[in-house]
Amino acid sequence: MKKISQIIASGIVLFSTALPVLAETGERTDNSMTLVYLFLGVCGLIIFLQLIPVFALGIGMLKGLFHHKETTATKTH
């Protein structure tokens, strides 16, 4: 009887140390595949590339507004 109680006690100690490991196995599962991320990246790239002309136009307008153009008056008769 003493040997059985020792085996049971050692089993309880073993399982009590393994319980925290079993409790933390609920890891996050990500079902998204690489193709989904690739598709989203291409969509983001398309949006970014469509914004480049907008920024170029805005910079051109600002240059046009603040650029001081010197004019020389020449008379021809």
Image (spheres, rainbow, N blue to C red):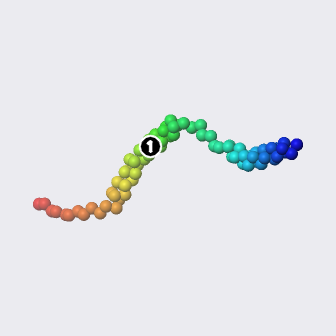
- Residue 67 figure quarter: bottom left
Element assignment for label 1: helix
The residue under the point 40% across, 51% down is 55
The answer to whether residue 70 of the structure is visible from this angle is: yes
Please provide percent x and percent y for residue 54: 40, 49
Q: Residue furthest left?
A: 77
Q: Residue furthest right?
A: 1
User: Dot 1 corresponds to which residue?
Assistant: 45
Q: Quadrant of the C terminus?
A: bottom left
User: For the residue marked with disc 1, what is the amino acid?
Assistant: Leu
Q: Quadrant of the N terminus?
A: top right
The answer to whether residue 43 of the structure is visible from this angle is: no
The residue under the point 48% across, 38% down is 38
Label 1: how many Cα within 10 Å (few below 14, some 14–19, many 20+): few
The residue under the point 84% across, 42% down is 4
- Considering depth in this image, is 60 or 73 the residue closer to the camera? 60
- Considering depth in this image, is 57 or 33 the residue closer to the camera? 33
- Considering depth in this image, is 27 or 76 the residue closer to the camera? 27
Q: Is residue 74 left or right of residue 13?
A: left
Please provide percent x and percent y for residue 50: 42, 44
Please provide percent x and percent y for residue 72: 20, 64
The residue under the point 15% across, 62% down is 75
Q: Is residue 56 left or right of residue 41?
A: left
Q: Is residue 45 left or right of residue 28?
A: left
